[in-house]
Image: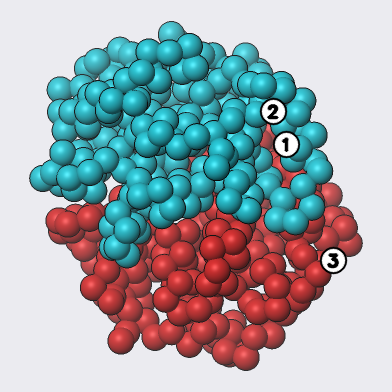
Chain colours: A red, B cyan
Amino acid sequence: MTYDLWYWTGIPGRGEFVRLPMEAAGIPYRDRAREEGDEAVVKHLKAMQHHPAFAVPLLEGDGLKIAQTANILLYLGEKHGIAPQDTEGRLWVHQLQLTIADVVVEAHDTHHPVAASLYYEDQKEPSIRAAELFREERIPAFLDYFERATGSGDWLAGNEWSYADTSLFQLWEGLRHAFPKRMKALAGDYRKIGAIAKRVTALPRLKDYLASEQRLSFNEHGLFRHYPELDVA
Amino acid sequence: MTYDLWYWTGIPGRGEFVRLPMEAAGIPYRDRAREEGDEAVVKHLKAMQHHPAFAVPLLEGDGLKIAQTANILLYLGEKHGIAPQDTEGRLWVHQLQLTIADVVVEAHDTHHPVAASLYYEDQKEPSIRAAELFREERIPAFLDYFERATGSGDWLAGNEWSYADTSLFQLWEGLRHAFPKRMKALAGDYRKIGAIAKRVTALPRLKDYLASEQRLSFNEHGLFRHYPELDVA
């Protein structure tokens, strides 16, 4: 069976948190908007009757329509074994994913503190202050946590990779794109996170995906944006 | 078995999304900070070794330590039958919970657009603009969605209440506390949501809880705050 993934073209965004473990596990999917355009996403969302989605990413297949990034990953973790199958491990990986999702929102809100619907240029002044506090307080708070959360194994949940690892990699890369100076200054404090990120890039199938044209670069339309005025070491 | 719930005293906050279904289902728990104070929460979080939590709410019991509101509810849903047990229903209720969590963050950020660590008074100007766009664009977008998401049954997932219903009730009440003028103007458009909120207050065990001193009122230290300057019909 081939899943249908619905997510905007042009940005890695939240869709990439779904693509990464699917690519790493070799789970087949069609990236519908990349075949049919973003208008198809809007049309598809509007037409949903039963169990509608508020937003994308949306994964369909197996008779299911699942929205919300962490929810999609919960499902994939259970169905395709890309998370521990026991209750404790399953909840632990989901907890990490939800905490990563919290950082993602805060990182986005550094350049959109007032509203997602306004241009960055129209909220630049509060952005500068928001980014300062995010860099100084929140990045270390969250990364201290993830560094502490890594156990003694090679991966967040022991000896096998899970979707929490691919998500931590994407978060790490996103922060390095948005705040290169700050992250360069901090990287030495987070060697375990850095090592997990490196292991993710070396997963055989993912290595090919990351080198392919399918892998979208971070850019200034997405969650993690590099505005030089928001980055200080 | 009695669970231990760790959450700050003095505000309903995210802890209340956990308390409501536990109260409604009669699941026994101790509210640890209300016995031992907020310092005990700080101390407890710092001392966690295995599977630490970034923040509270944190639920312990059954040999598990579970953080992140939606993750706790996922567990309670599965363990105590306060969510559908089939895959489709289980993911649907979790999807709704995660979407409610998104609104909660946006509602909080209307009074703390720049940083949670600054006083409201120090970010009042961007708050006024953030609240305006939240009232005008985001409240209707989210409530339109939840109104559409209610099916033909009495509850969000059919004929039995789930944690998504208690959470929708808490969101509805929180928005009514923070934006009474705006919500009064909009209430007529969301009769199905209003009906679910009313049904939640009539759940036998919950009725007693909501009338008790245990139930914390919304106040201006929590997620949903009423600042008159942020509310316009």
The label number, if any, that marks residue A3 in the structure image? none
Which residue corresponds to mark 3? A191
Instruction: Name the element at disc 3.
Output: helix
Which residue corresponds to mark 2? B117
Q: Can residue A126 be seen in this view?
A: no
Which residue corresponds to mark 1? A133
The image position of residue A211, as x and y in percent, is: 60, 86
Q: Which chain carries label 3?
A: A
For the point 30% across and 86% down, the residue is: A1
Image quadrant assignment for residue B132: top left
| In-image side of B73 versus B60 (left or right) | left
The image position of residue B106, as x and y in percent, is: 46, 35
Q: Which of B202 and A95 is in front in this view?
A: B202
Cα separation, mark 2 vs mark 1, equals 8 Å
Q: Can residue B23 be seen in this view?
A: yes
On the rendered image, what quadrant is the C terminus of chain B found in? Answer: top left
Q: Residues within 10 Å of mark 3 (few under 14, many from 20)?
A: few
- Are discs 3 and 1 both within one chain? yes
- Are discs 2 and 3 both within one chain? no
Q: Which of A72 and A228 is in front in this view?
A: A72
Q: Mark 1 lies on which chain?
A: A
The image position of residue A98, as x and y in percent, is: 55, 53
Image vertical order of residue A219 relative to residue B38, above or below: below
Cα separation, mark 2 vs mark 3, equals 27 Å
Q: Nearer the viewer, residue B39 or A11?
A: B39
